[in-house]
Image (tube, helix red, strand yellow):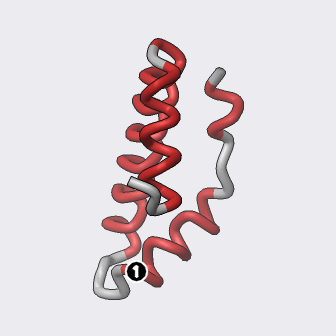
Amino acid sequence: STESFVLNYQALNDEILKCCPDLTADEAVDAGKSLVALLKILHEAVQENPELQTLISAQIKGDF
């Protein structure tokens, strides 16, 4: 469910600005919205294909 995607948007924006300090506040908000949209797409994809979750988890951990 999308309830697992309830995020603290201020924390997300802070992290985006740490990585990309030259972004404007509006650009950081847009980047955050895009990241949340990607997370939702990935969440739906792994629900349909559990092997994808294993692959994604391995890549996050650097075990690929």
Residue at x 41%, y 50% (from the top left corner): 35
Determine which residue is flagged by label 1: 19
Task: Give residue 39's position: percent from left, percent from top.
Answer: 47, 40
Viewer-nearest residue: 27 or 18: 18
Q: Is residue 55 above or below residue 32?
A: above
How many numbered discs? 1
Horizontally, residue 1 falls left or right of residue 47, namely right
Task: Give residue 37's position: percent from left, percent from top.
Answer: 41, 38
Q: Is residue 26 above or below residue 1?
A: below
Direction front: furthest residue = 63
Local SS, label 1: helix
Q: Amino acid at mark 1?
A: Cys
Task: Give residue 5's position: percent from left, percent from top.
Answer: 63, 38
Residue at x 48%, y 56% (from the top left corner): 60
Task: Give residue 30's position: percent from left, percent from top.
Answer: 35, 56
Residue at x 51%, y 68% (from the top left corner): 13
Neighbour tally class for label 1: few under 14, some 14-19, many 20 plus, Cα within 10 Å: few
